[in-house]
Amino acid sequence: VEPPPFICPRTGRATFHLAATDDGQILDASAVGVCEVTGRRLPADELVRCSWTGKQAAKELMDFCSLSGKPVLRSELRPCSVCQEKVSPAALQEGVCSACRGLQTVSKADPRMARLLAEYPLLDRWRRWQLAETETVYILTASGLWKKLLVVVDKETLELRHLATGNRLQSHWQPVEPGQYAFVLRE
């Protein structure tokens, strides 16, 4: 007498070919994969392919690049030298992300600017705004006669994520410590 085939709880397939995950789940062997980062055996539907390295890894090791929307291993994300947002290395060129390279001039009448100015009215005194957005943040630069300002704001909460100042005659930015944000915005 032959035993009946095992019905896999993940795939619903009847099979005699079984495998176990590291946490003890018994599944159809084709429904078990190996995380290429940790070596853990996991259900295959809990693995995601990194768009940068091509490795399949556990979901909890991944983040989504806010520029491409593609999954990237958290350990592979790199900060943009301008906005400091962590993005896929594929989105960086000479350390600068595609959003910061693509800033567009925007007026205060733009709905995104109106929303930001309502939250941070002290920003209204700046002239010549440029804006870019990712899936998660607004990146703004403003310039006055001699000074320039970089503001990175969470799109959902409008919380300041990064603030930097600079001189219009120089290309680099001087990061502002979070405790000094209010002081810099009042200058």
Image (cartoon, helix red, strand yellow):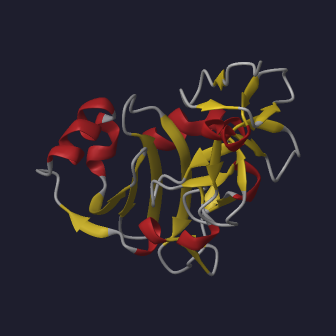
Using residue 52 as the reference point, say whether residue 57 is left or right of it: right
Residue farthest front in this picture: 1
Question: Which x, y percent locates residue 82?
Answer: 57, 64
Q: Position of residue 148 (x, y in %)?
A: 45, 64
- Count of numbered circles in the view: 0
Which of 114/47 is in front? 47
Residue, x 14% and y 51% (percent of image)? 110
Q: Position of residue 172 (x, y in %)?
A: 61, 72
Going 47% across and 57% down the picture, which residue do you hit? Answer: 150
User: On the rendered structure, is 66 left or right of 138?
Assistant: right
Q: Quadrant of residue 155?
A: top left
Frontmost residue, 144 versus 173 = 173
Examine the rendered structure and indicate whether residue 106 appears above or below residue 159.
below
What residue is rendered at 81% in x and 30% in y?
21
The reply to whether residue 12 is in sight is yes
Q: Percent from the top left, x then y, of residue 152?
A: 47, 48
Pick whichever, 132 or 4, lies toward us: 4
The residue under the point 64% across, 74% down is 95
Of the pair 141 and 94, the residue shown nearer to us: 94
Q: Is residue 83 left or right of residue 133?
A: right
* Location of the N terminus (image quadrant): top right
Res 85 visible: no
